[in-house]
Image (cartoon, helix red, strand yellow):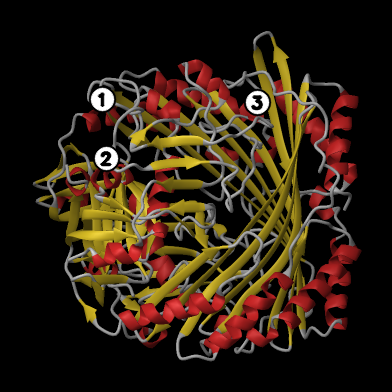
Amino acid sequence: MSSHTTGVDEEFLALPLGRLAEAALSAATAGGASYADLRVHAVTTEIVQLRDGELESAVLDRDIGLAVRVLVDGTWGFASHAGLTPDIAAESARHAVGVAVTLASLNADRVELADEPVYRDVTWVSDYRIDPFTVPTADKIAVLEDYSGRLLASDGVDHVSATAVCVKEQMFYADTFGSSITQQRVRTMPALEAVSVDPAAGSFESMRTLAPPTGRGWEAVAGDQVWNWSAELAELPTLLSEKTKSPSVVAGPTDLVIDPTNLWLTIHESIGHATEYDRAIGYEAAYAGTSFATPDKLNRMRYGSPVMNVTADRTVEYGLATIGYDTEGVAAQKWDLVRDGIFVGYQLDRVFARKLGLERSNGCSYADSAHHVPIQRMPNVSLAPGIEDLSTEDLISRVDNGIYIVGDKSWSIDMQRYNFQFTGQRFFRIRSGRLDGQVRDVAYQAVTTDFWNSMEVVGGPSTWRLGGAFNCGKAQPGQVAAVSHGCPSALFRGVNVLNAIEESGR
Amino acid sequence: MIPAQGAVDLTLQAAAHANRCDETIVIVTDRSEASLRWAGNSMTTNGVSTSRSTAVISIVRTGDGAHVGSLRSSVVDPDAVDDLVAAADKAAHTAPEARDAAALPTGAGEPADWDDPLPGTGAGAFAELARGLSGGFGRSERLYGFAHHTVETTFVASSTGVRRRFTQPTGSVEINAKRGAASAWAGISTPWFADVPIEQMLADLSMRLDWSKRTVELPAGRYETLMPPSTVADMMIYLGWSMDGRGAQEGRTALSAPGGGTRVGEKLTGLPLTMYSDPLAAGLECAPFVHTPSSSERLSVFDNGMDIGRVDWIRDGAISALVYPRAAAAEFGVAPAVPADNLLMTGGTKDLGDMIAGTERGLLLTTLWYIRTVDPTTLLLTGLTRDGVYLIEDGEITAAVNNFRFNESPLDLLRRATEAGRAETTLPREWSDWATRAVMPTLRIPDFHMSSVSQAQ
C-alpha cells in the first residue's frame, strides 16, 4: 500500500456496519440459513464529458445499499435494499430466506462452499495518490478543456470528444464464518477522440488516445507523470491526418505485430472469458455463452504456441480487478491459466472450486453493486513477456510484409469463444522489417486457438503494458466489472485481415 | 423509507429554502426487481431488490447562459437531502456554461395519479413460470435461461411547476434449450408477467431442436436469408442509437450525406416500411416525457418533463427524422425529436410461414449476438448468428446449419431487403438488457453477408 493512500473514507466507516451485519446474519440464521453473508456496497461514479471543448455533461452518481445472501438447505437466496438500518438488514435477510424457500424446488444442485481462512476486522485500500473525489468537478472540466483545446487547435481535427470517468468503490463484507472485511479502491478512465471530416466525400476518420483505464487516482488523468499526455496530444493530429490519407488495406493472411494497447482486448475476449469456470460448465449458456475450454481439456489442450504463458491475478499493482478480498471473503491470489501453451487453470469462486474438486477458491467472486448477486468474474488476466528483452522494433524487424496494430477499437467474439473479429486505432504497414506509413479499414478475424498458436514470439519485459476496460459485461441481470490485462507486444503469423469496405459489399 | 412523493417534495423544498440557484429539477425513481436464472435444468441465481435513485439538477442562469449541476444518489435517508441539494447547487455555480441551455418546461400541478401507491414486484411473479419450468426440467432437453421483472415508477418535478409520473413495467423470459450439440432459443417480453406462454415456448423449442436432427455444414458466403423479428430488432435498435442529428449534421456518422447535411429524405427501400417510436404503442407503453440526469447528443436535462410523442424515424422507406433535443433542434433549425423507449417497424404483410414456403433455398436465423461497429462511416456491424440457423429448401426447413460471423449494415439491409413480414412483438436478444419493447417484421435479404464460419454451437 502506498504511503499516499490514507484509508477507507470516514463517511463509509461512520455507517452502522457492525450492527447491520449482526442484524442480517442473526436474522438469516434464525430463519433457517446454514450460511449467510452481508455486503454493504457503495459505488460513486463521476462522468465528465466535453464535446468540442465545451461541457456536455458532468454527473456524480452515488449508489449504496446492502445485500444479504443466504444458503437454506443447499439453495441460494438473495435480497438487497437501499436502506441502511438494522431493521432493513434483518428484513432483507428474511426476504432472502423466503426467496430460497420459494424457489427451492427448482434447485437440483446442492450448493457447497470451499473453505477459506477467517479474516476478522481487516481493511484493504488500493494504491492511489490523488483521490479523484477530492478534485473539484470544475478542475476536472478544466483539464479536459485544456486537452480538447490542444487537439482542436491542430489542422485536420474537426471535432473532439473528451471523457473522464472516476469511480470509488467501498465494500464492507461479513459472513457467518466470522470474517469482516472493509475495502476501498478507486479507478479512472480518461479518453479523447479526434475526428476528421471530409464533407465532400461524406466520410470521416477518427483516432482515440491510448491512455488505459487504470486502478490509479486523478494522477493518471492530469499531468504527464503517469501518462505522457503532452506527447500523445501533440502527435495524435498528425497520426490522424496521415490515417485519413492512407490507402485501404489489402485483405488476406497477414503477419501482425500487435501492440499491448490492442492485444489486451484480444486476451480479454479469447482467454479471459474462455477460462471462466462458470461459462465452461454452462452457467452462462443462455446469455454470455459457454467456452470451448471445457473441464475435460484442462491440463491437456494446447491453447497456443510454447511462448504463451498467461496468468490470472487479483494482485497486480494498479490492476482494475485488483482487490484485497473478493465478495466471498477469499484473499487475493495469483495463478496460471496457460503454461507453455497448455491450458492449466480456471477462474473460480467458492462454489466452483468445490465443483472442480479443489480445496480453495482463487478469489474471483464479484458483484457490481449491492443490488446484484455475486458471481464469478474475471481477475486481471495477463500474457507474460519473454525472458529475452526484445523490443517492439525487434519484432517488427522479423516481418517482411505485415501490419503493426496499435490501440483497441471494436471487438466481437462468438458464444463459445472460437471466432473473433477486432479493429484498432492505428495500423502501420510493415515492409522489409520497417514501418512504412499507415493503412486503414483494417479488421482481423481468427479462431482463438489458431491465433494463439500463430504467436511466434513475444516481446520482452520492457514492452509489457497494462491495458483494460471498465465495462466488461456478464450475467443476467447484467453486471459490469473493471478488469486489467497486461501484455507485451507479440508477433503473429498469417492472421486473416479483412478490409471493412469490401466487407460492406462496396 | 419515506414514500417517493415525499422525497420529491422534500428535495424541492430544500432547494427552495436554500435559494442558491435559479431552478431545480428533481427526478425520483423507485425500482422493484425480481430475477430468476437457471442452467442445466437447475436454478443458479435469484434475487429481489428494492432501490431508489434521487437526481437533483440545479440550474444557475446568467443572461442567456445557464450552468448545470447534476447529482444522483441512491441514499434514502431524508437527512441526506440537504447535502445532496447543496452539492448540486455548488456544482452548478462552478460549472462552465451548458451548451444545451433552454427554458425549462412549465407545469400546472400534480396529475391525478400522483399520490397513488407504487406498484412493485417480487419472487411471487415467477410462481406460474416456476411450475412450468419444473415440468420442463424433467424432460430430455437441458434448459438454460432467465426471467426478469422490474417495476420502476419515475417522478419528475421542477421548480417551474412540472409534475409528471410514470410506472414502467419491464419483463422478459428467455429459454435456451440444448439437445446433444443442438441449441435453440425462445424469448418473450412480458411487462407484467401475466400469461407467460411457458408450455408454448417449450413446445416451440422442441420443434426447433427437431429441425436440428439433420445438420448441414455451409461455408462463408452470401445467402438468401430470412431475418426473423428478434434479429431485425437488434439491427434496427443499433440504427436507432446511431441516428443522432448533431453527429449527422457535423459529418461524423453514417447518417451524414456526401456534400454536407444529413441523409434525411433518402429513400432506403421501395418496401413500405415505417420505423418509429411511440410511448403510447399498445403493449409497449413507455414514459411519455423526458427524464434524464445528464445531457448527451440524444437528451438534454433542460427538456426534463417535456412530452415525448411518436416520431417516425423512417417513413414509407425513407429516412424521415433524426434525434434532436430542443437546443440542438434550434441550433440546426429542425423540429425537436426525442426517442421514446421502444421501437416499431411496420408495413410488411407476409406471414413467416408463407415467407418460408416462398423460399427455394435460403437460411432462417433465430437470433444475433455480440453486435459491434466495424466501420462507422457505413454503420457496418459485425456479429454472430446464435441458437439456430436453419436451411430452407423448396419452401421447407430441412436442416440446421453451422453458425456464422456476419458483417452487415442495418442501412444496407434495408436498402437490399426484398420482402417484409407482418410486424410482431419480439424480444431483441442482443440488446434485451436495455431494450425489451420492440415490434418488428421478418425481412428477406437476398444476399446476407456471412463473413466466416463460427464453430460455436
Residue labelled with disc 3: B302
Q: Earlier in the sequence, mark 2 or mark 3?
A: 2
> Please, what is the three-letter code of the amino acid marked with disc 2?
Gly
Query: Looking at the image, which residue is at 49% across and 67% down?
Result: B187
**Residue B443 seen in the figure:** yes
Q: Which residue is mark 1?
A: B258
Residue B259 appears at what percent x and percent y? Answer: 26, 20
* Horizontal relation, residue B427 to residue B383: left or right: right
Q: Residues within 10 Å of mark 3 (few under 14, many from 20)?
A: many
| Residue underneath mark 2 | B270
Expressed as whole percent of the image width and height from the top left, the position of residue B50 reads: 76, 59
User: In the image, is A464 to the left or to the right of A378?
Assistant: left
Ranked by sequence position, the earlier of labels 3 and 1 is 1
Graded by Cα atoms within 10 Å as few (under 14), some (14 to 19) or many (20 or more), the crowding at tag 2 reads some
Where is residue A408 drawn, in percent x and y? Answer: 36, 47
Work out whether disc 1 and disc 2 sit on a shared chain. Answer: yes
Q: Amino acid at mark 3?
A: Phe
Relative placement, left or right, of A483 versus B293 is left
Tell me the CA gap for discs 2 and 3: 39 Å
Could you tell me which secondary element the residue under label 3 belongs to? Answer: helix
Mark-to-mark CA distance, 1 and 2: 22 Å
Disc 3: host chain: B
Task: Work out whether residue B140 or residue A195 is closer to the camera in this orientation and state it.
Answer: B140
- A428 is higher (above) or lower (below) than A369: above
Q: Secondary structure at mark 1?
A: loop
A54 to B222, vertically: above or below? above
| In-image side of A162 versus B252 (left or right) | right
